[in-house]
Amino acid sequence: MKALSIGSAMIDIIAIIRNEDIERVAMSNASASFLLLEQGRKIDAESITIHVGGGGINTAVALRRLGHEATSLVKVGRDLNAEKVRECLTREGVSCALIISSDKAATGTAVMVSSHDRNASIFTSRGANTLLKPEEVAAVDFSPYDLVYVSSLSGNSADCFPLILDRAKAAGAFVAANPGIRQLTSRGGALLSSLAKLDLLTVNRTEAAGLTPSLAARFDLEALATVAMPAENCPPLLRLGLSFGGFDVSLPAFIAALRALGLPQVLVTDGGDGAYLGDGAGIHYCPSLRVEVAGTAGAGDAFSSTFAAFLAGGSPPQEALRAASVNAASVVSYVDTQSGLMTCADLKSRVREVADILPTALFPWRKAV
């Protein structure tokens, strides 16, 4: 399968801090937690390492390791960091033919500070990632690609999202997207209007919640289809639903609303609490594979791109969910975003090993009462 990955290219600078050298504060009535950095103080780091990352790069590498012919469409500066991006892709066997260089901004850079539960705080300078232009997208020939995967687009680059979907769908590709929270909140209307051109939308719990006000404005969410809730061991997000800015929406209503706008399949990830796929049959659930976490960055890229690749390749949803869960678990076992990405053979072998501890479930649709 030939795959095109579109998104960001970043240089990730990752600092690992010992738990005793930095304070972590968790909120009592919210899920947020904070790392406290004392002003004017030097803090010893266990390690500071530099890696190539970014959604457009991570997903291209993931797809290539799964055995697909991968090309990355990203925008970088004319600097040494851009050369590091190219070197990374070349080493992995990913085509650099569609990398675009800009004189107006540097290659994107991120600084990650990680401690305690290894869920890093990330400082980003997005640089050239914000400068993708419609005419640059229009110049791309989408016809060779079986899968077009669009990760988060930053700044003005997000304005290219509808055009990318138009071109990819017209070329007959399986089109998957994983937009970020800023893209969803600033351009949610454009996204909702483009859903019919997507085969798969992936969002995490926070991103899904950010879409709820727009959906509430379009639908009577309580009147949409739902699923039968299990009396015991109900998956967390299916039980709790989504909440944002005073809007409370059940997960089935959220998925049903997106499907009513023409989206065939929507994947909602919930970190360590598993993932949910909504399709014509209902809502499929797969738990997360428990591992020791070294870093959470890149887990979403691994999960969503692996799932998209398996689904586009004809795998059933249950197999795609398990494969995505295993690959994401492998990624979080490492500090950076790519070291844990698995080859197709290793991934399938590992999926067979853990099949018994990754039981999937299907909750069929039923009409709202």
Image: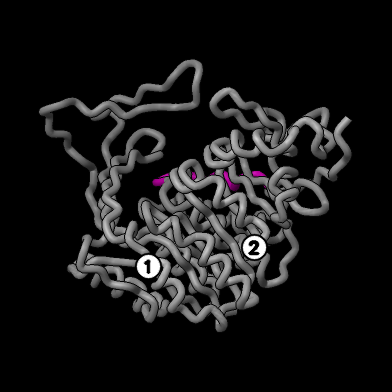
Asked if the magenta segment contains residue 150, the reply would be no
Horizontal and vertical percent position of residue 105: 22, 60
- Measured from the top left, where is residue 306 in percent x and y? 57, 62
Image quarter of residue 246: top right
Q: x%, y% of residue 133?
A: 38, 66
Could you tell which of marks 2 and 1 lies nearer the N-terminus?
A: 1
Residue extent of the magenta highlight: 286-295
> Residue shown at 22%/49% (left/top)?
48
Considering every residue shown, the one lying at the far bottom of the view is 144
Residue 85: which quarter of the image? bottom left
Instruction: Report the residue at 51% width, 45% height from top.
Output: 184
Give the dominant element type of the magenta stretch: helix, strand or loop: loop
Q: Is the residue marked by circle 1 packed among few (<14), some (14-19), or many (20+) residues within 10 Å?
A: many
Q: Residues within 10 Å of mark 2 (few under 14, many from 20)?
A: many
- Residue that mark 1 sits on: 74
Q: Is residue 322 above or below residue 241?
A: below
Residue in view at x 12 percent, y 33 percent: 42
Residue found at the very far top of the displayed protein? 28
Label 2, on which residue? 197
**Camera-side residue of 29 and 286:** 29
Residue 351 visible to an observer of this rendering? no
Q: Which of 317/173 is in front? A: 173
